[in-house]
């Protein structure tokens, strides 16, 4: 069983990646994060190909996953806004894993849950899938397996990059064929028009909060977003009490009678005396 079973018949390739990420979330967090990112990339490409309100960037360096999700048309599409934040976190956690930075079980599990929300958005709005249930943590296998070796992870990352390059090449080939074949172009446009219409009807009739309930508390997502931003900047490890929730004194007694308070993050620097 899998939380992503609803996708199996509609988007089997994305379903396969998502299930891999789910199965590895506790066993091999880094590998899971890479697979979540791949599933995200496949899903984003699917959306660009099947929703007429998404505009594929003409500039090559904007055709990366980051460029696609930050494009104004994509940000307008994935509503409510916090869904965009979750999409970015899937990408960032996956990137950190691919670059050899440590990914915790907490991060990999949240990444899978964010992926579930995005794919639930696609399933409900484009395929009229209705039989959703809340994300079930018990469907994630326990972590009785050691983390993948660095070599295995690098091989996985290379394989995913090759798959992405093939995806982009196939899209470019399809675009070239569309220009030469008016019938093919018209047929693909009709399919995209149908999906776009379905999404618009559902978006106007459905309660977004009911369709996309939170599997991760928003406060946890905000903290994880900060953690990933700090990790990208090179702050890779934090110790509770020294770097996180650091106790300070001198707080206004109006808000804290004890005068004590806690700083969320402390970024220690090195003082050089000349």
Image (cartoon, helix red, strand yellow):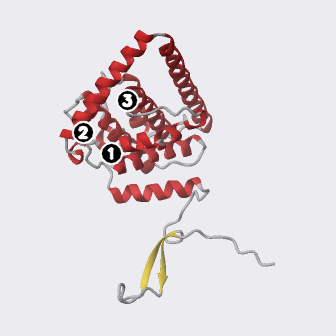
Measured as percent of width and height from the top left, residue 89 is found at: 45, 47
Q: Which picture quadrant has residue 253? A: bottom left
Position of 171 relative to 91 (above/below) = above
| Among the two numbered marks 2 and 3 on one chain, the one whose residue lies closer to the N terminus | 3
For this view, does 274 lie left or right of residue 134? right
Instruction: For the C terminus, give its image quadrant.
Output: bottom right
| Residue for badge 2 | 203
Name the residue: 23% across, 30% down.
Answer: 129
User: The N terminus is located in which quarter?
Assistant: top left
- Mark 1 or mark 3: which is in front? 3
Q: Nearer the viewer, residue 168 or 255?
A: 168
Residue 26 in sight from this viewpoint: no
Q: Earlier in the sequence, mark 1 or mark 2?
A: 1
Label 2 residue SS: helix
Could you say where residue 142 lies in the image, as x and y percent from the top left?
38, 41
Residue under pointer 1: 79
**Circle on res. 52:** 3
């Amino acid at each position: 069983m899998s939380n992503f079973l609803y996708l199996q018949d509609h988007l089997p390739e994305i379903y396969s990646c998502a299930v891999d990420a789910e199965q590895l979330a506790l066993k091999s967090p880094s590998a899971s994060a890479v697979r979540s990112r791949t599933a995200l990339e496949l899903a984003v490409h699917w959306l660009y190909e099947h929703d007429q309100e998404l505009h594929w960037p003409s500039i090559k360096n904007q055709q990366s996953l980051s460029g696609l999700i930050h494009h104004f048309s994509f940000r307008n599409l994935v509503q409510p806004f916090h869904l965009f934040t979750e999409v970015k976190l899937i990408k960032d956690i996956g990137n950190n894993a691919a670059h050899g930075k440590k990914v915790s079980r907490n991060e990999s599990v949240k990444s899978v849950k964010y992926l579930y929300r995005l794919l639930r958005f696609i399933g409900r709005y484009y395929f009229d899938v209705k039989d959703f249930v809340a994300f079930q943590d018990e469907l994630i296998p326990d972590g009785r397996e050691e983390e993948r070796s660095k070599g295995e992870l690098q091989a996985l990352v290379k394989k995913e990059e090759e798959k992405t390059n093939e995806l982009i090449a196939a899209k470019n080939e399809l675009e070239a064929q569309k220009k030469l074949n008016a019938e093919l172009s018209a047929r693909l446009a009709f399919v995209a028009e149908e999906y776009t219409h379905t999404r618009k009807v559902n978006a106007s009739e459905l309660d977004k909060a009911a369709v996309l309930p939170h599997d991760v508390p928003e406060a946890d997502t905000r903290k994880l977003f900060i953690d990933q931003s700090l990790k990208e900047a090179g702050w890779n490890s934090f110790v509770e009490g020294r770097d996180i929730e650091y106790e300070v004194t001198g707080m206004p007694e109006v808000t804290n009678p004890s005068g004590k308070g806690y700083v969320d993050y402390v970024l220690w620097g090195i003082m050089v005396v000349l």
